[in-house]
Amino acid sequence: MLYLVRHGRPLVEPGLLPSAWELDPAGFEDIWALRESGRLPDDGHWFCSPEPKAVATAQLLTDGPVGIVEGLAEQIRDTGDWIDRFEAVVRRAFADPTRSAHPGWEPLAVTRERVATSVRLLIADHPSEDLVLVGHGTAWTVLAAELTGAEPDLDRWALLGMPDVIEVDPVVESP
């Protein structure tokens, strides 16, 4: 089973790239509550995105080792632009995943391929074992769709908390 954990609430800093945002200490209690909830396996292998908010979330969720995997990063958003209608731009990215939905944004199809390739390699390295992956909502939404053969669930994406968990039982073969 894959446990796709969305990171905790970040400290949003307009002008700073989202990939550099740290966790907001005011949201640590939510992460600790997830840790104590029993929703995550005790014996899983842990990996996370290299982004500070994901690394810090993983470190708060487990005392065990956490591997950092570059390919688990969120959709690349190389702009510090503040976007008032963020959800609308993300939905535009899902509507046409081959194009950038905003200047500096990676096309969602590229995100999907990068993340899915990384996760398939992790699955191949850990067959029949639980994997806990700490990362990002958009990346997990496209990954869940890729691994299950379903369409991306934008309603689920919109409802994801910080932190939150998506459980996925992949139906694809490992490389």
Image (cartoon, grey):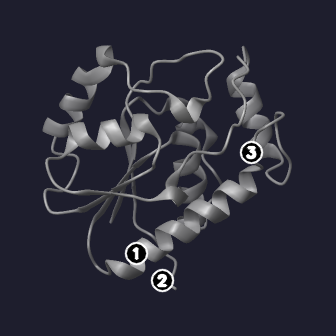
* Mark 3 nearby-residue class (10 Å; few <14, some 14–19, many ≥20): many
Give the distance between the C-alpha atoms of the residues marked 1 and 2, in whole angstroms.
6 Å
The residue under label 3 is 94
Task: Look at label 1 and name its amino acid.
Answer: Ile
The x and y percentages for residue 62 are 18, 46
Percent from the top left, x then y, of residue 148?
53, 66
134 displayed left or right of 19: left
In this orientation, which residue lies closer to the viewer: 116 or 77? 77
Left or right of 153: which side holds 67? Answer: left
Q: Which mark is residue 123?
A: 1
The earlier-in-sequence mark between 1 and 2 is 1
Q: Residue at x 83, y 43 (%)?
A: 100
The numbered mark, 3 or 1, whose residue comes first in the sequence reads 3
Q: Quadrant of the N terminus?
A: bottom left
Marks 1/2 in contact by CB < 8 Å: the verdict is yes
The three-letter amino acid code for the residue at tag 2 is Ser
Residue on which disc 2 sits:
174
- For residue 117, which quarter of the picture? bottom right
- What percent of the width, then of the height, locates residue 4? 40, 51
Amino acid type for the residue under numbered disc 3: Phe
| Residue at disc 2, secondary structure | loop
Q: Residues within 10 Å of mark 2 (few under 14, many from 20)?
A: some
Give yes or no for contact between labels 3 and 1 (Cβ–Cβ under 8 Å).
no
